[in-house]
Image (tube, helix red, strand yellow):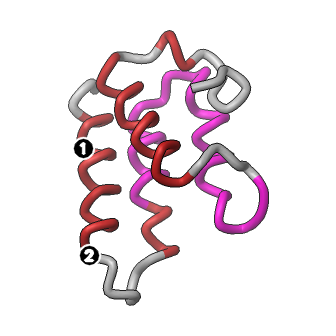
Amino acid sequence: INTNTFPCFNNLPVNVQSALVSLVFNRGSSMNGDPRIEMRVIKELVPQGDLQGIADQIRKMKRLWEGQNMGGLLARRDKEAALVESCI
């Protein structure tokens, strides 16, 4: 992940890095528009090392797919959030 996407990314625990790589691989690194609100908040939380905040934002972005028969994608976000929380 480019450090412009998530400054201080390299300072995060490996499991948190893995969750963010998965997130960016699946969603892309764009920070523009309403669908990217949570990505922008995560960008601010990474340098602070706020792991619970990062996990919470990953779960919040499920708002984009709820009610659209996308259970696998919702489960993926939950697993990424849990991976971040495993480092707390």
Residue type, numbered disc 1: Ala
Residue assigned mark 1: 82
Observer-nearest residue: 80 or 72? 72
- Quadrant containing the N terminus is top right
Q: Which residues are magenta?
A: 32-59
Please give the residue where the numbered disc 2 appears in the rendered image: 71
Q: Main secondary structure of the magenta part?
A: helix
User: In the shown orientation, is residue 59 left or right of residue 80?
Assistant: right
- Identify whether 39 is placed above or below 2: below
Q: Quadrant of the C terminus?
A: top left
Question: Circle 1 sits in a helix, a strand or a loop, which is it?
Answer: helix
Task: Looking at the picture, tell me which residue is in the foreground, 54 or 3.
Answer: 3
The picture places residue 62, in percent across and down from the top left corner, at 43, 68
Seen at 59% across and 54% down, the residue is 38
Residue in the image at 51% along x and 12% along y:
10
User: What residue appears at the point 77 percent right and 64 percent down from the top-left corner?
Assistant: 33
| 21 sits left or right of 31 in the view | left
* The quarter of the displayed image where residue 35 is located: bottom right
Q: Amino acid at mark 2?
A: Gly
- Which x, y percent locates residue 19? 36, 36
